[in-house]
Image (tube, rainbow, N blue to C red):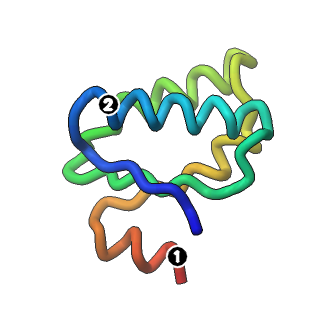
Amino acid sequence: MPLWCCPAASGTLDELADTFSLAMLDLQKKPLVLVNQDGYYDGLISFIDHAITEKFGREAAKQKLLVARTAEEALALLE
C-alpha cells in the first residue's frame, strides 16, 4: 500500500519530507502518492528535481513519488 500526502498543514509537509528522505536513502520501498491539487506542490516538485540535478537526491527516489492532480487520479495510479 503506498503512502499518501495531500495539501494540508506543515505536519503533512514534514511527513512528506521524512518519507521522501527515507526513499532517497532506499530505506522506503513503497511508492509515495502526492496529491498536487491545483498545483499546490509545483514548487516542491521543482525543488526535488533541482536537488536531483545537483546530486543531492537520487532519481530512483523520485520514481517512487507518484504525483496526481486529483484524488480520482491518485486512485487510478494505484490500480
Q: Where 79 falls versus 6 (above or below)?
A: below
- Tell me the element at label 2: helix
Query: Residue 21 location, x and y as percent?
Result: 63, 29
Q: Quadrant of residue 54?
A: top right
For the N terminus, the image quarter is bottom right
Of the two numbered discs 2 and 1 on the same chain, state the one appearing first in sequence: 2
Q: Where 78 falls versus 8 (above or below)?
A: below
Which of 20 and 45 lies nearest the eye of the viewer?
20
Query: Residue 52 location, x and y as percent?
Result: 67, 26
Describe residue 62's horizontal placement relative to residue 69 as left or right: right
Circle 1 residue: 78
Query: Residue 48 location, x and y as percent?
Result: 54, 29
Query: Residue 53 location, x and y as percent?
Result: 67, 23
Q: Residue at x 57, y 50 (%)?
A: 65
Q: Residue at x 71, y 33 (%)?
A: 24
Q: Residue at x 70, y 25 (%)?
A: 57
Describe residue 66's horizontal placement relative to residue 75 as left or right: right
Q: Where 6 falls versus 47 (above or below)?
A: below
Please state which of the two labelled residues, at mark 2 or mark 1, is closer to the viewer.
2
- Tell me the element at label 1: loop
Q: Where 70 falls versus 52 (above or below)?
A: below
For the C terminus, the image quarter is bottom right
Furthest-bottom residue in this view: 79
Describe residue 44's horizontal placement relative to residue 25 as left or right: left
For residue 11, the mark is 2
Amino acid carrying label 1: it is Leu
Amino acid carrying label 2: it is Gly
